[in-house]
Amino acid sequence: MFKQDIEFYNPINLKSYNLDQAMRYQLNMLDNLDPFTKKHSENVANLTCRMCEYLHSRKSFTIHATICAYLHDIGKLFIPSEILNKPSQLTKEEFEVMKTHTTIGYNMCMKDLKLRPYAGGALYHHECLNGSGYPNGVTKKDIPYYAQIIHIADVYDAIVSKRQYVTHINISETLKLLLKDTVPSIQSLALDTLSTQSKYGKINLKILKVLFRVVIDDTLYEISCTQEYIKYLEGQLKRLYKILKYEEKANNAKRITDKDYYLECMKFSFIQGESFENFHQIIIEYQDALKNRSNVVKKLYNEIDIIKKLGKQ
């Protein structure tokens, strides 16, 4: 049976920018990363680019932010694989090593004239507005706007990857987690910063709500892909139901010539992999798939309703 194939992130908006020439050298750097980190970097760049578009950013800013996003984790080249790929939670000492990918990436970029303009993406993408981030614990006024965008894209994709989402069903739960990070929390602040930074959460609410719009776009994209698959399933079932009618006529035929005619009609209507022996089972599989995908569409529309309500908070 034909398999439905969708991309979790809609690539259309990213492709609308002519980034290839500007990023060829930078993208080559990603080839040195492990496959998981490379894919994560590509996802974060995709999200960053599209968020910039919704923020009505200038094309030059969008391109700069997107390249910074591609390179934000380049410092992980020098993080030991046993730490980078550890499946369980990192120890305190291991996490301190992991945190150095920000300054390592920054230094790598600063030493390369072609990468120097994008060093801020590596340095600032784990900084938080309230000063609770790393490596330097800077606050909102000292965090570049493009880095605030990358931070949200980075956290979102990290959660999506960790939870192994293959569809946008229940994606609102991830957005709820991020929404909590926009709320000020005195527990994460040092006493000397309480008076000036207690009004900030970890991430920028305005940018997060732009991510909501991007996620809705991706959900609508998945709905569109799923509906196309539903049309395919309906077409196949229409053909198979016609074969069932031929079978019924063959079984009821009183003359051998009529029976042979209907059996030939059945045989002619089969496609590769179908036969007299298995087409009944194939019908059941298509019916189940159609029911499943129809339920998926309903759940995806429900997700959009939930996300829109979250965006009004």
Image: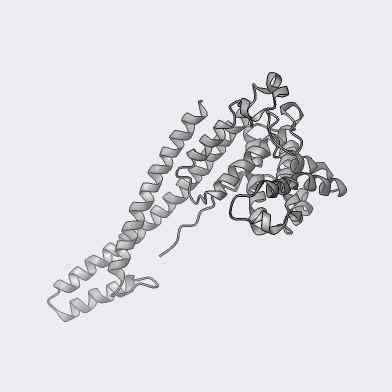
Q: Quadrant of the N terminus?
A: bottom left
Which residue is at 75% across, 38% downward? 60
Which image quadrant for residue 261?
bottom left
Q: Is residue 293 rendered to the left or right of residue 131?
A: left
Where 19 sits versus 124, above or below? below
Image spot of residue 183 (x, y percent): 58, 27
Viewer can see residue 289: yes
Image spot of residue 97 (x, y percent): 73, 49
Q: Is residue 16 rendered to the left or right of residue 272?
A: right
Where 150 sits versus 244, above or below? above
Which residue is at 79% across, 53% downward? 25
Viewer can see residue 18: no
Query: Given the current orientation, which residue lies at the most extreme bottom position?
Result: 256
Q: Is residue 239 rendered to the left or right of residue 213?
A: left
Query: Given the current orientation, which residue lies at the most extreme left position?
Result: 254
Front residue of this view, candidates 265 and 71: 71
Front residue of this view, candidates 139 and 293: 139
Q: Is residue 38 rendered to the left or right of residue 78?
A: left
Which residue is at 76% across, 29% downward? 142
Which image quadrant for residue 255?
bottom left
Front residue of this view, candidates 169 and 15: 169
| Coloration mode | one colour
Where 192 sits versus 273, above or below? above
Image spot of residue 5 (x, y percent): 49, 57
